[in-house]
Amino acid sequence: MTPGPAILESRALTVRYGDTLAVDAVELAIMPGSRTAIMGPSGSGKSTLVHALAGVVRPDSGEVWFEDERLDLLSEGERSRRRLARMGMVFQFGDLVPELTLVENVMLPLQVLGEKSRHARARALEMLDTLGVADLADRRTGAVSGGQIQRAAVARALVHRPAVVLADEPTGALDSLTAERVLDTLVAVAGATGAALVVVTHDHVVASHLDNLVVVRDGRVAEGAVA
């Protein structure tokens, strides 16, 4: 991995769901500007790991450090604010608000952070243009393709210039050609903004676009599987 202090780090991170140990004492460091794939079979705990790193899930034990702050010690509201301000998230199906247009969806993080609507719209249109879907800005999700929705989701994740982007199977619902285009754009735009990128995937082709590989099995990072 890139040398230097981690921007996002887990220490003995453990998450349980009832009797199931979903994440088992994981030690992981994400460096500023790095590109990391987290791979593993279905049910391996890789998605839970990323949600714990993002502060969506509070761990049962262990620590999560983000920008020199213990994220796991914060309240749910404080974790949400930190995530909104300094992280970007992309999910498998985009998770856009269907009642809003693409540009309105991309504006949301900026507006919640207090940006004026005019400036938020200008920045959102700029990001949609970078992702190649500015011509669809005023359409709702029902009037665009899955690949276009996912490009807008990437724009929303990057519009506020986050320090880290966490993407959970961002191309899993797309055909192979569209998936490659979306992933290439995600990697390029994250790189241009200086954001660290973490992508959960089961696809070796997706992982090959990234610089570092972490393999998760049965909730643990496999021995020798951090490269």
Image: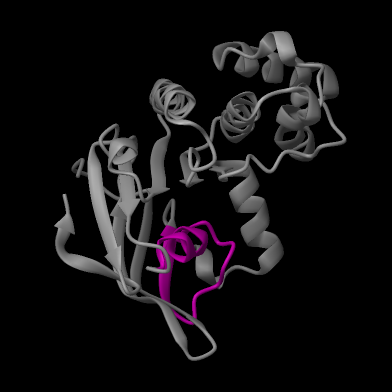
Residue nearest the viewer, comparing 180 with 198 = 180
Kindly indicate the quadrant of the structure image that contains residue 103.
Answer: top right
Residue nearest the viewer, comparing 26 with 8 = 26
Q: What residue is at 66 percent from the left and 56 percent from the top? A: 80
Seen in the picture, residue 60 relative to 179 is either above or below; the reply is below
**Horizontal and vertical percent position of residue 203:** 34, 44
**Horizontal and vertical percent position of residue 132:** 58, 12
Q: Residue furthest right?
A: 99
Answer yes or no: is residue 147 visible: yes
Seen in the picture, residue 225 relative to 185 is either above or below; the reply is below
| Quadrant of the drawing holding the N terminus | top left
Q: What residue is at 75 percent from the left and 28 percent from the top? A: 107
In screen coordinates, is 198 left or right of 169? left
Q: What residue is at 16 percent from the left and 49 percent from the top? A: 227
59 falls in the magenta region:
yes
**Horizontal and vertical percent position of residue 184:** 40, 23
Residue nearest the viewer, comparing 214 with 161 = 214
Answer yes or no: is residue 69 visible: no
204 falls in the magenta region:
no
Range shown magenta: 45-65
**Horizontal and vertical percent position of residue 157:** 59, 35
In screen coordinates, is 171 left or right of 9? right
Seen in the picture, residue 19 relative to 180 is either above or below; the reply is below
